[in-house]
C-alpha cells in the first residue's frame, strides 16, 4: 500500500501526472489556436458569411412563405355537358360543392374549353358525353372524361381528387336508385351499396398539405448544403491561394494533426447549432408547421448530423476543391441529387440496391429520414436508431478521412 511521503520528496508517480496534465493543457491550447484561426477565417470571408448567416435564414423564410397555404383549393375548371340530363346536373352540382374544385365556366363545346385551358383560365375540363344520361337510364356504364393541366402536379391532384370524391358519392346514389327499382330501399339498400364503411384518416398530415410533407426535408437539406458549401469555399480559397499548408500550425503537422481537425470541427459545430435550431425549429414553429417531436430528441439527433456534414465537407474540400468558386458549383451539382436520394421523392425501398447504398455516403440521407420522423411523425430517438447510428458511423469514418486529407496536404501541397 502506498503511503504519503512526509519527508518532502515528490511521489514517484508525480512526474508522470504532471506530464499528463501538461499534455492535456497543450492539446487544449492547440485546439483553441486552431478554433480561433478558423473563426477569423469565417468572419473575414464575405462569401462564407453570406452563405452561413444570410442564405441559411433567407431560404427557409422564402420557402415557408411560398408554401404557407399548404393546399390548393378552388381550382378553376370548365364543364362541357353534352348530355344535359338530371344525372349530369347532379354530378356538376356536387363538383361545385367540393373544396378542391370551382366550376368557373360552363362551356358549349370542347373547343371553347380547350381555348380557356390554353389561356390558363382553367386547369381541368370535365366532359359529359351526349349519351351519359341514356346509358345510366338503360342500366349501362356511363363515362365522364377529365382532362387536366399537367403544368403542375397539384392541378392534376386536385382535379382527380375532387372528381373521384364526387364520382364515389354519385355511384352510391345511382346504385340506390337502381335498388329502389327492384323494391329494395332504406337501410337495406344502403347496406348493399356500402357493406363496409371506412374512415379516411391521414396520419401526421391531416390536411394533406404540401408544405407539411415537403418542407421538413427541404429545410434539413438547406442546413446540409449551406454548411457543406461554406466549408468548400474555405477549403477552395486556401488551396487556390496556396495557404492550405500554412493554415496547419507547424508543430501539429506530424503526430498531432488530429487536433487541427478537432479544432476546425468544433468551430463549425458551435457556429451551426444555433443556426440549425432557427431553421428547423423556430421558423417552422412561426409558420405553424406540424412539430410533434420532442426538442431534446431533435437536438441529440442533430449533433452527429452537423458533425458528419462538417467532417465530410472538410474531407471533400481538402482533397478535391482547388478553387474558391468550385464550392458553389459542387453545391449546385449535389443539391438535386441529394434530395432525390433522400427517400422523400422516391421511397428508398424501391431504389436499386446500389443507389440505396450510395445514398448513405452522404449525411443528408439518414439526416433527412431521421429528422422527418422525429419532427413530423413524433418519433423518439430509439425509433430512429438506425439513422442515428448511421450518422455516428459517418462521423468516425469522415474524421479519419479529414485527418488523412490534412496529411495529404502536408505531404503534397506547397507552403
Image (cartoon, rainbow, N blue to C red):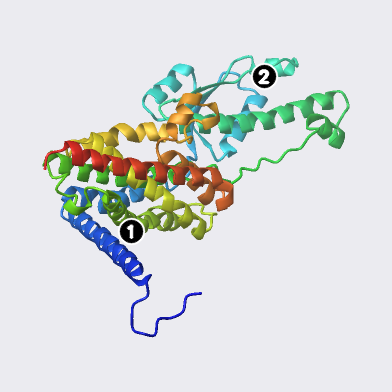
293 or 40, which is in the foreground?
40
Give the left or right position of residue 134, taking residue 262 as reference: right
Element type at mark 2: helix
Q: Residue at x 74, y 14 (%)?
A: 138
* Whole-percent x, y for residue 182 in the image: 87, 23
Front residue (pair 57, 196): 57
Q: How many marks?
A: 2
| Residue furthest front as drawn | 7
Q: Nearer the viewer, residue 47 or 399?
A: 399
Mark 2 and mark 1 residues within 8 Å of each other at the beta carbon = no
Which residue in the structure is indicated by mark 1? 270
Question: Disc 2 marks which residue?
Answer: 133
Query: Up-down: is 10 above or below 70?
Result: below
Q: As displayed, is residue 323 above or below residue 136?
A: below
- Tell me if 208 is positioned left or right of 402 in this view: right
Q: Is residue 271 above or below residue 390?
A: below
- Report, in whole angstroms, how far the alpha carbon at label 2 lies from the one at label 1: 70 Å
Q: Position of residue 252 (x, y in %)?
A: 22, 52
Residue at 19%, 42% (x, y): give it: 410
Quarter of the image holding residue 90?
top right
Q: Nearer the viewer, mark 2 or mark 1?
A: 1
Q: Which residue is depicted at the point 36% across and 59% down?
A: 274
Q: Position of residue 64 (x, y in %)?
A: 39, 48
Dot 2 or dot 1: first in sequence order is 2
Amino acid at each position: 500500500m502506498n503511503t504519503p511521503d512526509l519527508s518532502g520528496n515528490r511521489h514517484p508517480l508525480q512526474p508522470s501526472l504532471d506530464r499528463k496534465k501538461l499534455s492535456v493543457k497543450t492539446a487544449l491550447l492547440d485546439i483553441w489556436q486552431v478554433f480561433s484561426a478558423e473563426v477569423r477565417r469565417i468572419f473575414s470571408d464575405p462569401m462564407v458569411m453570406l452563405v452561413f448567416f444570410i442564405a441559411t435564414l433567407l431560404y427557409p423564410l422564402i420557402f415557408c412563405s411560398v408554401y404557407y397555404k399548404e393546399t390548393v383549393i378552388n381550382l378553376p375548371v370548365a364543364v362541357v355537358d353534352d348530355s344535359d340530363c338530371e344525372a349530369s346536373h347532379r354530378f356538376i352540382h356536387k363538383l361545385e360543392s367540393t373544396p378542391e374544385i370551382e366550376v368557373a365556366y360552363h362551356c358549349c363545346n370542347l373547343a371553347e374549353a380547350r381555348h380557356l385551358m390554353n389561356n390558363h383560365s382553367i386547369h381541368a375540363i370535365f366532359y359529359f358525353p351526349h349519351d351519359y344520361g341514356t346509358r345510366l337510364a338503360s342500366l349501362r356504364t356511363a363515362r365522364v372524361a377529365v382532362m387536366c393541366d399537367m403544368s403542375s402536379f397539384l392541378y392534376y391532384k386536385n382535379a382527380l381528387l375532387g372528381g373521384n370524391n364526387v364520382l364515389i358519392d354519385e355511384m352510391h346514389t345511382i346504385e340506390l336508385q337502381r335498388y329502389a327499382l327492384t323494391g329494395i330501399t332504406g337501410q337495406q339498400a344502403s347496406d348493399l351499396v356500402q357493406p363496409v364503411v371506412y374512415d379516411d384518416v391521414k396520419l401526421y398530415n391531416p390536411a394533406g398539405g404540401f408544405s407539411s410533407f415537403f418542407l421538413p426535408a427541404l429545410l434539413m437539406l438547406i442546413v446540409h448544403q449551406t454548411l457543406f458549401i461554406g466549408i468548400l469555399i474555405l477549403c477552395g480559397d486556401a488551396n487556390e491561394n496556396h495557404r492550405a499548408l500554412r493554415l496547419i500550425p507547424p508543430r501539429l503537422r506530424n503526430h498531432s494533426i488530429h487536433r487541427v481537425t478537432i479544432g476546425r470541427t468544433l468551430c463549425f459545430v458551435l457556429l451551426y447549432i444555433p443556426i440549425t435550431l432557427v431553421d428547423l425549429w423556430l421558423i417552422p414553429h412561426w409558420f405553424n408547421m406540424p412539430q410533434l417531436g420532442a426538442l431534446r430528441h431533435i437536438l441529440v439527433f442533430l449533433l452527429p448530423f452537423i458533425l458528419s456534414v462538417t467532417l465530410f465537407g472538410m474531407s471533400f474540400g481538402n482533397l478535391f476543391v482547388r478553387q474558391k468558386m468550385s464550392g458553389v458549383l459542387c453545391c449546385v451539382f449535389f443539391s438535386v441529387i441529394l434530395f432525390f436520394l433522400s427517400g422523400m421523392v422516391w421511397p428508398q425501398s424501391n431504389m436499386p440496391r446500389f443507389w440505396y447504398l450510395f445514398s448513405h455516403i452522404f449525411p443528408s440521407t439518414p439526416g433527412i429520414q431521421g429528422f422527418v420522423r422525429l419532427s413530423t411523425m413524433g418519433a423518439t430517438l430509439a425509433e430512429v436508431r438506425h439513422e442515428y447510428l448511421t450518422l455516428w458511423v459517418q462521423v468516425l469514418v469522415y474524421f479519419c478521412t479529414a485527418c488523412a486529407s490534412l496529411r495529404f496536404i502536408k505531404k503534397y501541397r506547397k507552403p
